[in-house]
Image (cartoon, rainbow, N blue to C red):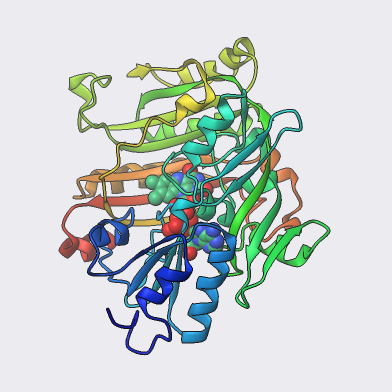
Amino acid sequence: MGKVTSDMSMSLPELRAILNGRVIAPDDAGYDEARTVFYGGIDRRPAVIVRPADATEVSLVVSLARETGEELAVRSGGHSLAGHSVSDGGIVLDLADMRALHIDAERRTAWTETGLTAGQYTAAAGAHGLATGFGDTGSVGIGGITLGGGVGYLVRKHGLTIDDLLAAEVVTADGQLLRVDAQTHPDLFWAIRGGGGNFGVATRFQFRLHEVDTILGGMLILPATPDVIHSFVAEAGAAPDELSTIATVTPAPPLPFVPREHHGRLVVMVMLVYAGAAEAGQRAIAPFRALATPIADMVRPMRYPELYPPDEGGSHPVAAARSMFVDAVDHRAAETIVDHLQASTAPRAVAQIRVLGGAMARVPAEATAFAHRTRRIMVNVAAVYERPDEAAVHEA
Ligand SMILES: Cc1cc2nc3c(=O)[nH]c(=O)nc-3n(C[C@H](O)[C@H](O)[C@H](O)COP(=O)(O)OP(=O)(O)OC[C@H]3O[C@@H](n4cnc5c(N)ncnc54)[C@H](O)[C@@H]3O)c2cc1C
């Protein structure tokens, strides 16, 4: 077996000899699976994929990349839309085998390695009736979502994911393993809370846990008229902080709980999460049920981890997608959403609206690198399609 790449200073056998973690090269079984990321249409062939066993090995891989000048792609859950967690010809540092989690239920804190997914962390914390807020999808890695900020089902009640980040361990480009928190390396701690992945490789996070056991939540499906969309945004902004919502405007998929006559017609699929007492939750959710006659109403008391159904895996959508922050969705904007979704030829076209505020907005904008504290609404628009050669149509 030759060098990792033509000018790399360490051969694969040497790399394998010094690491306990897995080293996966193009000739190895499992290479194609290991280089696959969540989004389809990203077909890159790294020279090697390394799955370090611990932070010392992470440091070794970072040093190897620095010394050889090879491109280094860092991966936690592999959900980067831009494909940042896989390199063509370089080294992938995949944290998938670093999943140790220690929950201190009494102190309500958890130390976790960063290869864990949001769903795995939530299930483990949920066993203690505790939670840290992540996003809406269990398979997203806690590495990427935390470093980017983290907007999820508890955003109005407990803030962004980074608002519960108490400390982290980070391997910097010089190979040092630093512990960072508000007192130690405060500038780096500031940067990794919302600044993204390039300040170093985060190997462990310490999170605050909240008591979040039974919530009132689930999906409410409403017809998608401009009136309903506009009024939804107004109600979500006026709701108590306990209630966070994610509304997805999209043609109704042919799911068993969607009556047949609505299949393919534009609906608003609202995920509601009231993190508080059920009775008060019912009162908070009533205005949403009154926006129109619900097509389906699956809102019920449930345990918080039930919001993350088991990941079936294997799906690799190709998507043209953009996220943006806005301060209002007025009637005209709601009409635009409806018109564009109806005109889209994508197999799946969505506009997802998240009304923010609450705890997230109470943290001063300068406290962390996340710059959008005062924005009222996050919108994601996406055209999900199958054939990569249709990219131009759906990007447009
Ligand atoms: C289906 C889906 C649903 C989503 N829902 C939400 C949501 O509800 N809320 C929300 O806020 N976001 C959401 N996101 C966005 C998601 O949080 C980001 O794409 C996030 O960066 C993915 O993290 P990852 O670890 O899975 O991805 P990766 O591709 O592994 O990493 C993403 C980026 O972070 C870097 N990185 C990852 N781990 C580390 C680490 N340990 N140290 C240093 N750098 C690292 C990578 O190099 C890459 O640049 C969603 C994305 C998808 C695809």
**Outermost residue, bottom direction?**
7
Please name whichever residue, 176 or 164, is drawn nearer the observer in this view of the structure. Answer: 176
* Count of residue discs: 0
Where on the picture, by quarter, is residue 377?
top right
Say which quadrant the C terminus sits in. bottom left
Instruction: Give the percent coordinates (x, y) of residue 326.
Output: 54, 51
- For image coordinates 65% across by 57% down, the residue present is 193
Q: Residue 115 location, x and y as percent?
A: 49, 51
Question: In this rendering, would 190 be left or right of 174?
Answer: right
Q: Position of residue 308 (x, y in %)?
A: 44, 31
* Residue 207 drawn above or below residue 306: below
User: Is residue 101 left or right of 105 when viewed as pictured?
Assistant: left
User: Is residue 379 something that shows in the picture?
Assistant: no
User: Is residue 364 visible from the viewing direction of this image?
Assistant: yes
On screen, residue 260 above or below 370: above
Q: Work out which residue is located at the far right of the displayed protein and give it.
A: 183
Q: Residue at x 52, y 82 (%)?
A: 66
Where residue 184 sits: x, y (%)?
Answer: 80, 61
Residue name at image x 16 percent, y 57 percent = 387
Q: Quadrant of the N terminus?
A: bottom left
Q: Nearer the viewer, residue 190 or 205?
A: 205
Q: Residue furthest top?
A: 279
Residue furthest out toward the front = 17
User: Who is closer to the viewer here, 278 or 204?
Assistant: 204
Residue 219, relative to residue 112: is it above or below? above
Left or right of 160 in this view: 97: left
At 48% from the left edge and 61% from the top edge, which residue is drawn? 52
